[in-house]
Image (tube, grey):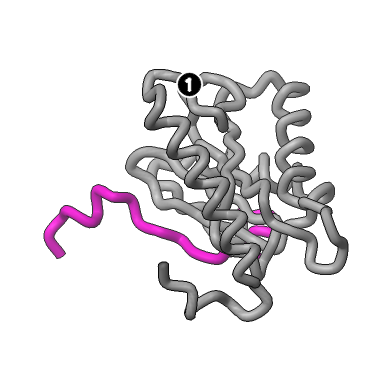
Amino acid sequence: MFLEGLPEGRSRSDHDQCSRARNSRLSQEQQDPAAPAPMTARPVEPGVTLFVCVTCKHPDREGVLPGRALYDAVEARLADAAAQDVALRSIACLSVCKRPCTVAMTAPGKWTYVVGDLDAQASADDVLDAARKFAATADGIIPWRERPLSFRKGVVSRTPPLALAVEEV
């Protein structure tokens, strides 16, 4: 296993914890591939799938998982709004440990955004605002000025849709 390239501040035990969570999930899927995914919050045909990393640790407070708090806050707002356009999923690790409280937004045929440095409580409304704007686009590209402020500052990456990978350039 390649561990020499761990980001500064990320320990081997952090990496090992993410790996154990991922491997545990994979072994459960291999045992019963027909079982529903444990990360599924609710089955819908979404305009966007929103992944929230729930294993990030707070940099200053031991045992605090800000991603879990963000997930819970977004889940509560989705339940209140009875929203059907956003599928919420928890994920064991997005590998953005230096910028905890990270989400990814994706949909078939659209660009994927990964956004970090979100506040566990204050960013829930921004996350849903961005997710709905993302769902409303044809290609997933949200114009910079239309993004919530936390998304303008926190973009880690924007990844092209798989369909672009097979097109001739």
Occupied quadrant, residue 42: top right
Occupied quadrant, residue 35: top left
Q: Measured from the top left, where is residue 154 in percent x and y?
A: 64, 64
Is 92 above or below relative to 29? below
Q: Measured from the top left, where is residue 101 in percent x and y?
A: 70, 56
In the rendered structure, the answer to whether residue 164 lies left or right of residue 116 reads: left
- Circle 1: is it few (<14), some (14-19), or many (20+) Cα within 10 Å? few
Could one spot residue 153 in this view of the protein? no
Q: Nearer the viewer, residue 43 or 127?
A: 43
Tally of numbered tags: 1
In the rendered structure, the answer to whether residue 78 lies left or right of residue 24 reads: right
156 in the magenta segment: yes
Q: Nearer the viewer, residue 141 or 29?
A: 29
Q: Residue placed at 69% from the left, 56% from the top?
A: 56
Could one spot residue 120 in this view of the protein? yes
Quadrant containing the N terminus in the rendered view: bottom left
Start and end of the magenta stretch? 146-169
Indicate the secondary structure of the residue bearing disc 1: loop
Q: Residue placed at 63% from the left, 80% from the top?
A: 8
68 in the magenta segment: no
Q: Residue furthest right?
A: 61
Q: Looking at numbered disc 1 in the image, what kind of residue is underneath it?
A: Pro
Which residue corresponds to mark 1?
Answer: 36
Q: Nearer the viewer, residue 150 or 43?
A: 43
Q: Measured from the top left, where is residue 10 in percent x and y?
A: 64, 72
Q: Residue placed at 64% from the left, 23% from the top?
A: 83
Q: Residue placed at 77% from the left, 51% from the top?
A: 65
In the rendered structure, the answer to whether residue 66 lies left or right of residue 115 reads: right
Quadrant containing the C terminus in the rendered view: bottom left
